[in-house]
């Protein structure tokens, strides 16, 4: 499907089921059952990267964690034999945060976040035959479900609360959710390997594995919302209004907060003051706070610390610098006449003399050190070395450290 069609017809609006013949037929390059076994048995997995549930109830982590033995005595490490017993008894295994653990999913989730403009996370749900891990519920983020192995019967119902926020979880509306789950579903389908399902946040869903082990990936999309902008505006308002002496004034002695009318006039003064300050809030400043919060959640390409450190020490005019992939960057003029580089969650200060060089690298994405414009040879090397050691740029294929 053309991304613009998806954006116009489905994004944050309604579910979409896509079959394997239209997705490419398999997601085994991202995860398969043997990879799940490796994660559970040989990767030193710890909680909360593993969660186990059965029939809607989360299993106490003490039932599947233990010490790792000599030299690894930390007590919250996953016990593969305990997981085996629970799984054989019908429990669902949930691998959480795979966008930080499993290399194919690290790359996939990071690139997807860059494409969507919204942060992502990845969990895997592995369910034994004829079992259900969770009762009907909704998520407070959009999800893409990618069926990896086996078959799973999905039932989707209309939301009881559209576009829920993170502060509005489904268990706060458990009775409404249970009642809505008894109504006619909007999607009632079996997902097979290669099938994909998109669900906007708020849609109720539950899934049951059929006659064999079933595994699917859930890619959670943490949507940047208007409420995110509202929170940024309120944060800025709190900062600005704190400078108002009227709002810092103590309330009268002897006040009785059990009688709301006794402080009504004081509260009215506060509200009027806040309304005045809200009118002074600059939308551009709010947007910048929204950017900072969102960029802090989006992970750029991982770097190899040892290899890149060695490469930084060996830079020359012919060395290629590549802007770190998926690192969001922007140049700003600083009040002190210097230049500020906003790079992901960080803010770095540079002399104004490197503006042309930084702008050229950000525009091209890749340049040789000797081609950085506007600088003397020694200054080019100094800038390049800082960009590499600050993980703004990388040296492609630097070789071993």
Image (cartoon, helix red, strand yellow):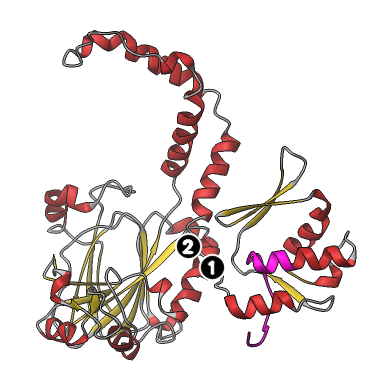
Element type at mark 1: loop
Q: Are there few (<14), some (14-19), or many (20+) residues within 10 Å of tag 1? A: few
x, y percent for residue 117: 53, 58
Left or right position of 108 against 214: right
Q: Residue at x 50, y 55 (%)?
A: 296
Q: Residue at x 88, y 60 (%)?
A: 375
Q: CA distance from mark 2 to mark 1?
A: 7 Å
x, y percent for residue 136: 18, 62
Nearest the eye: 132 or 332: 332
Q: Which residue is mark 1?
A: 2
Q: Residue at x 44, y 37 (%)?
A: 230
Per the rendering, the mark at residue 6 is 2
Nearest the eye: 345 or 383: 383
Magenta-tinted stretch: 385-401
Whether pointer 2 and pointer 1 mark residues with C-beta atoms closer than 8 Å, the reply is yes
Nearest the eye: 158 or 262: 262
Report if residue 34 lies within the magenta region.
Answer: no
Q: Residue at x 86, y 69 (%)?
A: 371
């Amino acid at each position: 499907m053309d991304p613009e069609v998806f954006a116009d017809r489905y994004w944050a609006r309604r579910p979409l089921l896509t079959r394997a013949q239209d997705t490419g037929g398999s997601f085994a390059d991202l995860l398969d059952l043997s990879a799940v076994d490796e994660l559970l048995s040989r990767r030193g997995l710890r909680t909360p990267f593993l969660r186990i549930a059965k029939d809607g109830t989360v299993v106490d982590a003490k039932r599947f964690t233990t010490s790792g033995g000599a030299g690894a005595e930390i007590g919250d490490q996953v016990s593969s034999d305990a997981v085996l017993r629970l799984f054989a008894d019908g429990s669902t295994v949930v691998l959480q945060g795979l966008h930080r653990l499993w290399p194919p999913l690290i790359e996939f989730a990071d690139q997807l976040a860059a494409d969507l403009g919204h942060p992502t996370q990845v969990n895997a749900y592995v369910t034994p035959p004829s079992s259900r891990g969770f009762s009907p519920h909704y998520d407070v983020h959009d999800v893409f479900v990618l069926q990896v192995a086996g078959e799973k019967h999905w039932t989707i119902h209309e939301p009881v609360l559209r576009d829920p926020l993170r502060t509005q979880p489904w268990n706060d509306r458990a009775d409404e959710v249970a009642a809505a789950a008894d109504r006619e579903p909007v999607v009632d389908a079996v997902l097979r390997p290669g099938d994909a399902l998109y669900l906007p946040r708020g849609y109720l869903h539950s899934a049951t594995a059929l006659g064999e082990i079933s595994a699917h990936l859930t890619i959670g999309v943490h949507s940047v919302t208007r409420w995110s902008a509202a929170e940024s505006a309120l944060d800025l308002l709190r900062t600005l209004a704190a400078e108002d002496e009227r709002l810092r004034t103590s309330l009268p002695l002897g006040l009785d907060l059990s009688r709301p009318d006794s402080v009504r006039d004081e509260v009215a003064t506060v509200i009027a003051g806040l309304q005045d300050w809200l009118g002074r809030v600059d939308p551009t400043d709010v947007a910048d706070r929204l950017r900072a919060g969102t960029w802090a959640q989006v992970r750029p390409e991982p770097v190899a610390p040892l290899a890149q450190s060695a490469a930084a020490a060996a830079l020359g005019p012919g060395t290629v610098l590549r802007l770190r992939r998926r690192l969001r960057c922007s140049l700003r003029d600083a009040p002190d006449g210097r230049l500020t580089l906003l790079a992901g969650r960080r803010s770095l200060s540079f002399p104004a003399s490197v503006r042309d060089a930084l702008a050229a690298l950000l525009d091209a994405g890749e340049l040789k050190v000797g081609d950085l414009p506007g600088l003397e040879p020694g200054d080019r090397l100094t800038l390049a070395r800082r960009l590499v050691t600050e993980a703004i740029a990388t040296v492609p294929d630097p070789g071993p450290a």
